[in-house]
Amino acid sequence: MRPAGGVPASGLPAGRQEPGSHPVDPPPFRRRPAQGAAVAVNRPDPVPAVLESQSRLRALLGGLTDADVRAPSALPGWTRGHLLSHVEGVGFALARQARYALKDELIDPYDGGRPARDAAIEAGHGRSAAELRAAVTAALDEAEQAWTAVGPRDLERPVRYRDATLSAAALAWWRELEIHTADAAIGYRTAQWSRPFCAHVLDFLAPRVPDAVRLTLAASDGPEALVLGDGEPVTVGGALTDLTAWLAGREPLGPLDSGVAPLPELGPWP
C-alpha cells in the first residue's frame, strides 16, 4: 500500500492501495474527459487546502486514548498507531521537500529510503496516545512552517520526490492528510471530502482504470460525470465521495450502481 499523498507506504497487505506518493499530479480541479476531448485546466494553489487539512487533523487528535490508538484503522493490518506514525513520517518527508526546494536544493524524502520509513512506522506505532499526538503535532507544525513559506511562484520548483515539482509534493501531502484522516476513523469520514478534493483524486487515479474499459463515473448528487479510459463502456453511479472512495481503494459508505455489469477490477495506484 501507498500512503495518501506522496511517499510509498509500508508493508501493508497486498490488494489495497494507499493514497499518496505518485508521479507528477494533475491539477486538483481538473476533470479528465474521454480520450480526444478538450481539457479545461484550472491550476489553483494547493497550499491553502493542505493547511486546512492539517488543521482538521490537529483538532481531531485531542481526544485519542491509548485504547483508541491500539484499535484497527480502516487499512488492513494497520492500527491507528501505525497510521499516525506514517502520517508523522510523511509530514516531515514532504515538508523537507519544500524547505530544500526553496533553497534550490534536492533531497530524498526519507533518509534511508523506504526501508527506513517502514522501520520507523514499526518502531513508532506502539507509542502511547500522548506520545503519538505529540509526534504528529510536531510533524504538522513542521509542515505548516514549510508550506506557508511556499508561494504560488514556487510551485514549479523541482523536488526529488518523484522527480516532480513542489506542486506535486503539496498535492501528495493533501491526499495523505485527507485520505488517512478518514482511514483513522477518528471523526472524519470519506463522505466529508470536498468536491475539489474528489475531483483531484478521481483525475489522479484515472490510471487505475483497466485497459479496454471506458469508465463513466456519474455522480448522483451533483453534475460531475467523468469519463476515464477508452474501450468497453461501463457506467458507475453513486455519490461523488463514494465514487472517489472506491477508486481510492476504500469502502464506499453508500451504494454504487454499475447496472448489470460488475464493478471493474482496478489496477494499482499510479
Image (tube, helix red, strand yellow):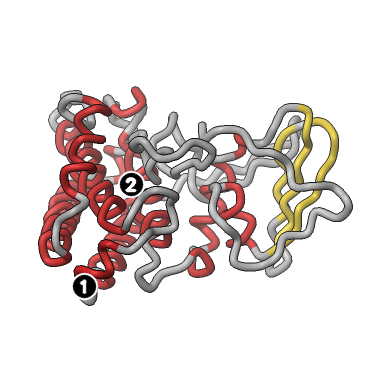
Question: In the image, is residue 261 above or below residue 99?
Answer: below
Query: Residue at position x 31%, y 52% from top?
Result: 83
Q: Which of 24 and 193 is in front in this view?
A: 193
Q: In this view, does 253 lie to the left or right of 223?
A: left
**Upstream in the sequence, badge 2 or badge 1?**
1
Question: In the image, is residue 78 above or below residue 219?
Answer: above
Q: Nearer the viewer, residue 188 or 39?
A: 188
Does the CB distance between marks 2 and 1 fall below 8 Å?
Answer: no
Which residue type does callout 1 highlight?
Thr
Query: Residue at position x 64%, y 38% from top?
Result: 266
Q: Nearer the viewer, residue 131 or 247?
A: 131
Spatial CA span between label 2 and label 1? 26 Å
Residue at the spot of label 1: 65
Q: Is residue 261 left or right of residue 133?
A: right
Q: Position of residue 52 (x, y in %)?
A: 32, 63
**Which mark identifies residue 173?**
2
Instruction: State the residue lying farthest toward the right.
Output: 260
Q: Position of residue 66 (x, y in %)?
A: 20, 68
